[in-house]
Image (spheres, rainbow, N blue to C red):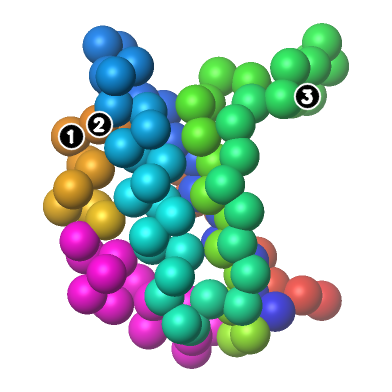
Amino acid sequence: MFVHHVFFWLNPGHDDKRDYFVSQMQELCKIDLIRDSRIGVVSPSDREVVDSTFDYSLLVMFDNKADHDAYQVHPDHDVFIANCKDLWARVQVYDAIDV
């Protein structure tokens, strides 16, 4: 299993684009290489180890690294970036594989 977890911090002033951003992530998750996916928002926490500064997270799981790599160059992934890159101020990615 290959896990690709992406965190997005949206630019200030784009509150009216939140529904659009979620719909674009939902479209992205339709790529057939994806085994499972989840779209999330911050869960409030008082724990010091929890980063609650992001706006959205996208968790995407693949059967293997090859599927992930193909996803990265998939035309629909490029469309997502083109449609949404002006909405975010920061993106942070964490990739992991099963041990």
| Residue in view at x 61 percent, y 77 percent | 35
Place of residue 21 in the rendered image (x, y in percent of width and height, measured from the top left): 35, 39
Q: Quadrant of the N terminus?
A: bottom right
Amino acid type, label 1:
Asp
| Residue in view at x 22 percent, y 75 percent | 75
Q: How far apart are the two marked residues, 3 and 1, measured between alpha carbons? A: 29 Å
In the rendered view, tell whether residue 28 sits above or below residue 54. below
Q: Quadrant of the C terminus?
A: bottom right
Residue 86: mark in rendering = 1
Secondary structure, mark 1, is loop
Which of the pair 42/98 is nearer the observer? 42
| Residue in view at x 62 percent, y 54 percent | 38
Earlier residue among tags 3 and 1: 3
Q: How far apart are the two marked residues, 3 and 2, measured between alpha carbons? A: 27 Å
Residue neighbourhood size for the residue with mark 2, other residues' Cα within 10 Å, grouped as few (<14), some (14–19), many (≥20): some
Q: How many marks?
A: 3
* Residue 15 in view in this figure: yes
Check if residue 76 falls in the magenta segment: yes
| Cβ atoms at labels 3 and 2 below 8 Å apart | no
Place of residue 60 in the rendered image (x, y in percent of width and height, measured from the top left): 57, 63
- What residue is shown with label 2? 87
In the rendered view, tell whether residue 53 sits above or below residue 73. above
Which of the pair 91/81 is nearer the observer? 81
Which of the pair 89/24 is nearer the observer? 24
| Cβ atoms at labels 2 and 1 below 8 Å apart | yes
Place of residue 14 in the rendered image (x, y in percent of width and height, measured from the top left): 27, 19
Highlighted magenta segment, given as a residue range: 65-79
Kindly report which numbered mark, 3 or 2, lies closer to the viewer in this rendering.
Answer: 2
Residue neighbourhood size for the residue with mark 3, other residues' Cα within 10 Å, grouped as few (<14), some (14–19), many (≥20): few
Check if residue 21 falls in the magenta segment: no
